Image (cartoon, rainbow, N blue to C red):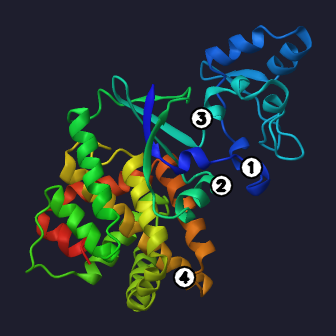
Amino acid sequence: MKVFRPTYVKNFRCDGKLCDARCCHDWNVVVDDATREKYSELPAEAREEFFRHVTTLDGENVLQMTPSGACPFLDENFLCRLQIKHGENFLAAVCQSYPRVTFKIADEIFLQAMTLTCPVAATEILFGGKISFETGELTARMVFDFTKKISMPAEKFLSEQRAGIEILQRRELPINERLRLLCEHFGEKISASVEFDAESNAAALVEIFDEMYDANLTVEKKSRLIETFLSVREEILPLLKSFEPIAENYLVNEFFMRLYPCAFPGGERFNVRVFVTAWRAIEFAVILTAVSKSRLTVEDFLELLCFISDKFDHSRGGMSAIKNFAELHDAEIFQALMMN
């Protein structure tokens, strides 16, 4: 079976020494049926070594982590003893697939990307040059079936996604102009008469920040954040221009990996609103980071993008705050708040 993917996927090589094997800590690693069957057929000693670390959680078979939260099969060199001893085919499906994310969008049509929650993958995605795409062989064992969630025929979806990515990769334009064109392409009405409202933008981003991080900020703290943001915004945002190639790769990967413009129910226009609002939330976090650290380095930017990607993926308030904002406002208000 064939899969459409960025070329960086084939370049990825897991190296736990580079990130302290972050993905081998504090996860519920599900032991899928195929993995369980393979280990059941091993000689007694190898079979017993594996199954003494398998427990049941919420009706699923999972690996029981050590008291430190690490996988029991992680060795002192941050390598997997199971893979060393038995080969990659003996990994659980989630371990064999991660950080790859694979979707089925129609019979024989698959998309595969990688998530920034893996620092090694993030480096490959963000610093590997302009993202290009290829067709390859599907090898992932964990596949998310998106066929019933996609809101248009698969061929149209692929065409629209390509169109969005082409806009995001127009390097002759600043990021803000690319986002404006993206919104227009997917049905957002952009009026030249509507001016950007910096104060309302700041207030909206503080509310999103509060919900994303479950911060329960007081009115006074929100006011201080708004004041801080407004006082340094014009000074710090231009610094992002030096990070535009990184920002572009982040946006392209997000658009592809999260299956925009069909990531969420609500239509293409709503989806692209979510996409743009999520980026504005990142810009807000960049400014707060620059203020708190009195600097803004490439390493800071990379760390922030990885952290927020994890927030979007695993936090209950992560994407819900973004989606709530995107569906609440008419075209003019959305433009005034998010199209700077």
Amino acid found under the numbered disc labelled 4: Ala
Q: Secondary structure at mark 1?
A: loop
Disc 1 + disc 2, Cβ < 8 Å: yes
Tell me the residue that label 2 is attached to: 120
Q: First in sequence: mark 2 or mark 4?
A: 2
Asked if one can make out residue 218 in the rendered structure from this viewpoint, the answer is: no
Q: How many marks?
A: 4
Mark 1 lies on residue: 15
Quadrant assignment, res 42: top right
Please provide percent x and percent y for residue 101. 50, 39
Q: What residue type is disc 3 on?
A: Ser
* Quarter of the figure with residue 179: bottom left
Q: Earlier in the sequence, mark 3 or mark 2?
A: 3
**Residue highlighted by disc 4:** 290
- Residue sitting nearer the eye, 7 or 241: 7
Structural distance between the alpha carbons of marks 1 and 4? 30 Å
First in residue order: circle 3 vs circle 1: 1
Drawn side of residue 121 relative to residue 207, left or right: right
Instruction: Name the residue tied to disc 3.
Output: 97
Nearer the observer: mark 3 or 4; the answer is 3
Q: CA distance from mark 2 to mark 4?
A: 24 Å
Disc 3, SS = helix
Q: Is residue 16 left or right of residue 203?
A: right
Residue visible at 56% across and 29% down in the picture: 139
Q: CA distance from mark 3 to mark 4?
A: 35 Å
Q: Which comes sooner in the sequence, label 1 or label 2?
A: 1
Vertical placement of residue 201 versus 63, above or below: below
Label 2's element? helix
The residue depicted at 87 percent of the width and 17 percent of the height is 46
Question: Which residue is painted at 50% across and 63% down in the image?
Answer: 215
Disc number lying in front (1 or 4) = 1
Which image quarter holds the N terminus? Answer: top left
